[in-house]
Amino acid sequence: MEMKKWIKNNRHTYNLLLNVYMLGRKISVIPEYLFADSFKVIKNKKKSKSCYLILEYSGKSGLMTQMIIVIGWLKYALENNFILVVDMCSGENMYQQNSENVWEKFFLQPMYEIAVTKHEVERIKREENYAICPKKLKHNYQFETMFSLACKIRKPTITFPMPRDYLNRTNLHRKWEQIYKRNIRFQEPVYNYICTEYESILKNKKRVLGVLARGTDYVQSKPYNHPVQPSIEAILDKCEEIKESWDYIYLATEEQAIEKKFREKYGDQILINKRQYYDGNYQNKWLYDVHLERKNDAFLRGLEYLSSINLLSKCNCLIAGLCGGTQAALIMNDNYYDYVYLFDLGNY
């Protein structure tokens, strides 16, 4: 409590110290950023010509961010003659309930023919040539801008497109779209689920505007250096501005209060998919800490999220704030939207 009181009374000093700290963190990763290719040290050096790139993923990011990270390393693997192995069973993540490979609950391996278990990862490390993806690299437009001179000397391994890059770095986004289209494949039950939702919600409906409206933990906690999300009023105003362009709105949101506001304004013109909403105070916690009392909750929340973004990518137009779900929808849409408006309001 004393710390909170000090921050409240010394907001300017606190912000200054925070900015200095974040700058120090950025500077600390410069060696990793500039010399990223040093990770390409092949372990074992067996006679086999095959070389595996193991992505050992752990973290609390949502499923769409996980997918985008896989696409990034898939791009690197394709360009450098690696076979990418997605390992989401060795580390903890928000969709994990046991020792299963979380990636394979939703997707097939993009370059590997069989399922990847901990046992299979250990076999590859023991018997094959392999390299492991570094975990701390921060390859994005911000770093290319800050260290542009150094980057001309030493190119980074991967430049991940940010949501705001959709308009100002179109070639980079097109590459991600192509890799997604060719290499990301759903598990059959997941594919059947999202197809069924598409048939019941969007099929035969013309002129559908997709809207992604983040709420809950993202808006209440305002995570530092993450894109500022638009207010619901701003999104509704933008929907009104182009009202002649749509007959329905498909609304992708995790907060029931947002769905209620849209429903009050547009009634039966609002389309939603089956998903569990979250409402409450999230200033001091994240959605990945919330566990619902239903069987197989971790998998179902990922499935509902994936289906929601897939539906969003099938709409004719898109209005959204900048976040991982927006980026995934843009990649999955493959540049077929008739109209895109992204709220770029800076960072928190």
Image: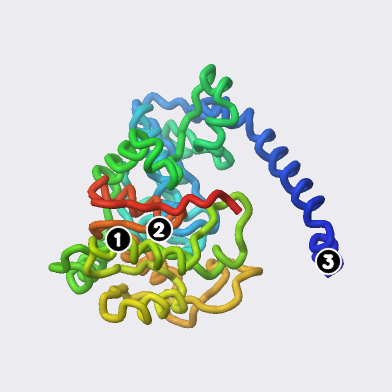
Question: Picture coordinates of residue 32 (x, y %)?
Answer: 60, 31
In the rendered view of the protein, which quadrant contains the N terminus?
A: bottom right
Whether residues under marks 2 and 3 lie with C-beta atoms below 8 angstroms apart, the answer is no
In the rendered structure, which disc, 2 or 3, sits on the residue that comes first in sequence? 3
Which of pointers 1 and 2 lies earlier in the amino acid sequence?
1
Secondary structure at badge 3 equals helix
| Residue 118 visible (yes or no) | no
Q: Is residue 29 left or right of residue 14?
A: left
Q: Which residue is mark 3?
A: 5
Label 1 secondary element: loop
- Residue 202 image offset from top left, x and y in percent: 20, 68
Vertical comparison of 169 with 312: above or below = above
Q: Amino acid at mark 3?
A: Lys
Between label 1 and label 3, give the one nearer the viewer.
1
- Res 252 → quadrant: bottom left
Q: Amino acid at mark 1?
A: Ile
Residue at 40 percent across and 58 percent down: it is: 320
Q: Which mark is residue 320?
A: 2
Judged left or right of residue 90, residue 188 is left
Relative to the observer, which residue lies in front, 15 or 99? 15
Between marks 1 and 2, how big is the CA–CA gap?
14 Å
Give how far apart the Cα atoms at labels 1 and 3 are: 45 Å
Where residue 196 sits: x, y (%)? 20, 70
Can residue 46 be seen here? The reply is: yes
Residue 128: x and y, percent? 42, 34
Quadrant including the C terminus: bottom right
Q: Which residue is mark 1?
A: 242
| Label 2 residue SS | strand
Residue 190, placed above or below residue 37: below
Q: Splitting the image into 4 quarters, where does residue 188 fall? A: bottom left
